[in-house]
Amino acid sequence: MKTTNPQQRALALFSIPVFLFLVIPTAIVVPVALNDSRYITFPPEGISFAAVAGFFADRAWTSALTASLQSAGIAVVIGVLLGATAAIGLHGRKFPGQPAVVGLILAPMIVPTVVLALAFYQFFISVGMVGSIVPIGLAHAVIATPYVYLTTRASLAGLNPALVRSAQSLGAGALSVLRHVYLPVILPGLISGALFAFSVSIDETVMSLFMQSPGATTLPVKMFTDIQFNLTPKIAVSSALLVSVATVGLLLQVMFVLKRRSSARMLPLAVSAQT
Amino acid sequence: MTASVISAGSVPRSGRAAQGAIELRRVSKRYGDVVAVDELDLTVQPGEFVTLLGPSGSGKTTTMMMVAGFEEHTAGSVLIDGSPVDTLPPRERNLGVVFQNYALFPHMSALENVEFALRMRKVPGPERRQRASEALDRVGLGKMGDRKPRQLSGGQQQRVALARALVFKPAALLLDEPMAALDKRLREQMQEEIKTLQKSLGISVLFVTHDQDEAMAMSDRIVVMRDGKIVQSGPPEEVYNHPETDWVASFLGDTNLIPCTIVERDGEEAVVDLGGLGLAKVRDRGASGENYAVSIRPEHLKFRTRTSAGNGCAATLLSSTNLGATVRHRLMAGGHELQLRELSSDRGAGIVPDEELWVGWDADKAQLLVLES
């Protein structure tokens, strides 16, 4: 692939600007966070970790970070359990109404977040659950589940159905089949889905905003509310933090996929990190 | 699924007095209006090698899957060693199954694959490994235990699958077109190996294939299936030499079908009128239908002298094709086009120069059958 033909050059001419357009705004927050200034400015006037230190010294910001990580934790655990079991349960099975079931699982990806936010808000109010990070985590789990379902379903496409039968004929019960047949096949999809779930939750703002309460304010919500009164470099620091988390997640995913040399039946690795 | 159901206790332990008899009593499988298997009666005796032979869609694989427990039959009963297994899940039927593409666990080594059934039966580690390596030794892969399936050739994967299906001493072995993915030479080698292994273990085998050569080479008994029904069953030579219908005759290889009318029959032999070929005495299995024909395999037609005893008639040679080991002649005799096949080494044996060409056959090699098509 050393020689470049006109098509390849045309492709590069198109894709490099698009790539830069997508990456530069995301990457720009990092130098801004390391700016030696009390205000958000670009280009940076000098490099300093003062804003980073300030971020981690401020309890309001660290508790927002903790809240985000907690909600992401809830979303990942529940999303993985629901998404993976749904994918396995529906794998290779046809029954009336199956498209409806799949549609229901995928619905949270399509329904506007603000609608979901309102619905969850009213629901959690009516059962008296607002006031902690739990309802936010549960709501995030709902929007994270379709990602895990899709990545798991994609890796299941590579499963030889005869493996299940052969395990059964050799004496394996349901749990053994799950462990020895399904798990090795779906593991890349599961990890991929978990990373998606994590970044979806970390990034989610609208629902978290609706259900926020003291002690249950996630990082994007804290950024959103602060940005209106108090434009400090700490906002840039949290943005940089979110970008780094997303980048690390993406790299982990890529490394894992490359290491497994699995047939890489995965969704395009599009971790959104707009903050 | 509750804990008690998945405990090892419900999986039959190896060493139980397994004879390996499989019996199907009027077993049917319907998908809506479609009848895949139609009131099948079939018995595999302990130690017997029975082949279900048929084209795709004949219900042979469905039948095997019902024995294994992967497909539920809609009527009838399946018995293993005399007891009904209709309600038992596959893992409790104690049958070794080899699948078409082997279905080895890709993330486990060959040895771990073979160990799997023992692991499910809670056999302790050291014993498990020893039994698994013995099973691998038996199929000639003792040194390949560490390899992953993808590092093994098709034939080696096949052997691992075989070792895996045998290691827990199953009541019987079910083989679903296990050689379909192998090339011809390897397939023939595996046929012999499986046959030898089966004989030395004395295990019953239910074998599914659409390859009549494979069925001929391996079986104690061939069960020919078509449209969910058994159309004929018997030892390979019998089914091959004495087909009951033209469909069976053609499915099991090349044959000459000569339409005929029955002059007289006694259930063993019949005298038939072959039209231009005259009257002939042929074998009869007593099958009845509307139209009849006589089947003579190409290798049972011989060039003869006019004075030879038995059936025969004058013929003219249309063409000859050398097929390597054999030569195929196309002949015209009594208004029928016939095929005659002889060994290349015997080419032209029986032909007397300067005399009219004459072909004949032995009465016991000509089979009266029912014309279906």
Image: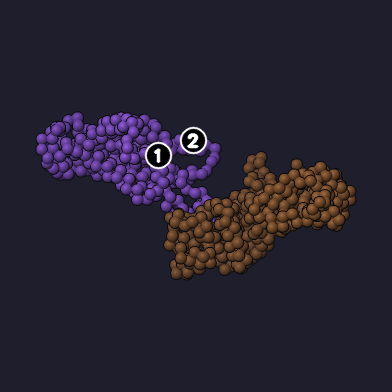
Chain colours: A purple, B brown
Amino acid beneath label 2: Ala
Q: Residue at 53% of width from left, 62% of height from top?
A: B163
User: Where does the image place residue B44, in percent across and percent down from the top left?
Assistant: 67, 59
Q: Chain of mark 1?
A: A
The quadrant where residue A56 appears: top left
Which numbered dot is residue A146?
1
Instruction: Pick the residue in front: B85 or B255.
Output: B255
Residue with the most extreme front position: B354
Residue with the most extreme right position: B264
The quadrant where residue A268 appears: top left
User: Where does the image place residue A41, in percent across and percent down from the top left?
Assistant: 14, 32
Q: How many marks?
A: 2
The secondary element bearing badge 2 is classed as helix
Q: Is label 1 on the same chain as label 2?
A: yes
Amino acid beneath label 1: Pro
Q: Residue at 36% of width from left, 33% of height from top?
A: A116
Q: Indicate left or right for B9 with A240 as reference.
A: right
Instruction: Pick the residue in front: B60 or B309.
Output: B309
Q: Indicate left or right for B89 with B23 as reference.
A: left
Q: Chain of mark 2?
A: A
Q: Residue at 82% of width from left, 49% of height from top?
A: B356
Q: Earlier in the sequence, mark 1 or mark 2?
A: 2
Q: Report the quarter where the N terminus of chain A lies.
A: top left
Residue position for label 2: A100
Q: Is residue B161 visible?
A: no
Q: Report the quarter where the C terminus of chain A lies.
A: top left
Q: Is residue B217 visible?
A: yes
Vertical side of A201 occupied by B240: above or below: below
Q: Residue at 71% of width from left, 48% of height from top?
A: B320
